[in-house]
Image (cartoon, grey):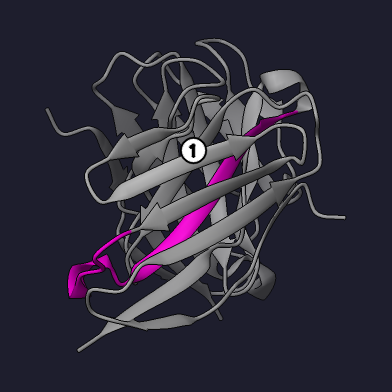
Amino acid sequence: RKEVEQDPGPFNVPEGATVAFNCTYSNSASQSFFWYRQDCRKEPKLLMSVYSSGNEDGRFTAQLNRASQYISLLIRDSKLSDSATYLCVVSTGGGNKLTFGTGTQLKVEL
Amino acid sequence: NAGVTQTPKFQVLKTGQSMTLQCAQDMNHNSMYWYRQDPGMGLRLIYYSASEGTTDKGEVPNGYNVSRLNKREFSLRLESAAPSQTSVYFCASSEGARDEQYFGPGTRLTVT
């Protein structure tokens, strides 16, 4: 089983739609969780950290469910500029490094 | 404040040639990382340096060596390039091992 698993997509949604991605992780001792965004042929960039209580940043909401070992990202009112690959990232191995999921591709269409 | 910089941006090597990828960060971060990214595989950690003077193997270290030259710089060396090392290489840095990482723009390497 992979340490971090994501549905690769692509998710094709119309502009203005709400879309949600889930990610599962295998190490129950993981302590840090992030969502990164990667545009085509560019470097990954931090979108948001994920906290136990859940957190929101504008149109983006991240949730953490430790009991079920999954993390979610909700994007409301999708924009064309949200088209990218979203990477789920989790600390592993006693917390001394991060493991990246393979990413979920989102395409927002007119 | 340039963040994380990498050189070169593109490189083509012949099998058996050697080269060094350079990475520097100006955020005074303790930890630095080298990843490779291949289609369908996601980012895979090659080597990392938790602090100046230390380096450790990641998931895919074979065929690579690293040097943490000082707190700012972390280089990746391919001693004898192979076609399987064709990939996009990203350098990253973070304050600590569990903190968010900041990435450089990447080096696109082709080995023929």
Question: What residue sits right under mark 1 in the picture?
Answer: A34
Query: Is residue A78 in the magenta section?
Result: yes
| Residue stretch in magenta | A76-92
Identify the secondary structure beneath mark 1: strand
Residue in the picture at 58% in, 33% down: B66
Query: What residue occupies the far bottom of the structure in this picture?
Result: A110
Does residue A94 appear left or right of residue B91 in this picture? right
Q: In the image, residue B105 lies at what x, y percent?
A: 30, 52
Query: Is residue A108 in the magenta section?
Result: no
Q: Amino acid at mark 1?
A: Phe
Q: In the image, residue A88 lies at what x, y percent?
A: 55, 49
Chain to which the residue tagged by mark 1 belongs: A
- Number of marks present in the image shown: 1
Query: What residue occupies the far right of the structure in this picture?
Result: A1
Dividing the image into 4 quarters, which one contains the N terminus of chain A?
A: bottom right
Residue B77 falls in which quadrant of the image? top right
Does residue A75 appear left or right of residue A89 in this picture? left
Dividing the image into 4 quarters, which one contains the C terminus of chain A?
A: bottom left
Does residue A8 appear left or right of residue A51 in this picture? right
Regarding residue A37, the answer to whether it shows in the image is yes
Q: Is residue A45 above or below residue A49?
A: below
Residue in the picture at 19% in, 69% down: A81
